Amino acid sequence: MDNGLKTRELEPAAALACERLHGVRSRIEAALRQAGRAPDSVTLLAVSKTFDAAAVRGMAACGQRVFGENYLQEAEEKIAALADLPLEWHFIGPIQSNKTRPIAEGFAWVHSVDRLKIAERLSAQRPPTLPPLSVCIEVNVSGEASKGGVAPAELLGLAEAVGKLPGLALRGLMAIPAPETDPVAQRAAFRRVRDLFDDLVARGHALDTLSMGMSADLEAAILEGATLVRVGSALFGSRKIQHA
Ligand SMILES: *Cc1c(COP(=O)(O)O)cnc(C)c1O
């Protein structure tokens, strides 16, 4: 999308937001061209954690509609403050089992499902008036003990069970591979996620979402088939607040 004309009429902070958004969209388009993929085949999820509602409103004014949050309480405040805008909210952080209800009620998507108990609670607590909650299973392809995500060996069983829950729509996989600066190593990790995704599709799961790639490695992810990239700092600037 070209916001060139509009950008010049905006305040400096807003103009910077639109410039960053335009820059990230250009990176996505270039990677899609390099991969020989269709121009609109990647969704940009703007990760707004630690940035306030005004920053999200500014990004929305540039044309961004889909936002991701990691921390429930922080997300709830922003969602309430921005209820006048037609935004789509994705939950991408670790989920405690006593926090599933507000997530099931307040979000369109959850990317970080990694155990059945959480999936069952989200399904049971999804209001019947809403469409099923779109979910991705988070898979831990780098084997980092400290990170969330199901081990690849456990993925098939979890996907079978999650796929049967009536309140959820299993859409695909999410991964946060260990950070690598070498693009070859980045691609190898994303390739492992892609192989797991292809295996589930071959087994009959109707998946359409491969949620992988962030500010530093979105090109590698797109080259390996990402359909959704989760981008924070390249859009909002570096995060000053660090959560535990
Ligand atoms: C913070 C975060 C992102 C965005 O990371 P950046 O490097 O700022 O683009 C993406 N996905 C998850 C799960 C995150 O927690």
Image (cartoon, rainbow, N blue to C red):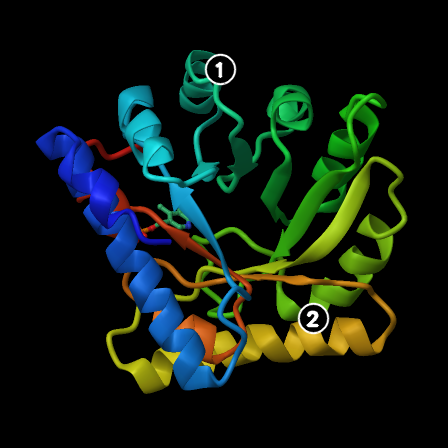
Q: Position of residue 140 (x, y in %)?
A: 54, 63
In the image, taking residue 1 as reference, residue 155 lies left or right, namely right
In the image, taking residue 232 as reference, residue 148 lies left or right, namely right
Image quadrant where residue 155 sits: bottom right
Type of the residue with mark 1: Asp
Q: Position of residue 98 (x, y in %)?
A: 63, 22
Outermost residue on the left side: it is 12
Q: Quadrant of the C terminus?
A: top left
Element at label 1? loop
Name the residue: 41% across, 19% down.
Answer: 78
Image quadrant where residue 242 sits: top left
Q: Judge whether 234 appears above or below 129 on screen.
A: below
Q: Taking the image as drawn, is residue 15 in sight?
A: yes
Q: Nearer the viewer, residue 25 or 165?
A: 25
Q: Mark 1 against mark 2, which lies toward the viewer?
A: 1
Instruction: Please tell me the numbered disc located at residue 153.
Output: 2
In the image, taking residue 43 as reference, residue 156 lies left or right, namely right
Name the residue: 50% across, 16% down.
Answer: 83
Can you identify the residue that label 1 sits on? 84
Type of the residue with mark 2: Ala
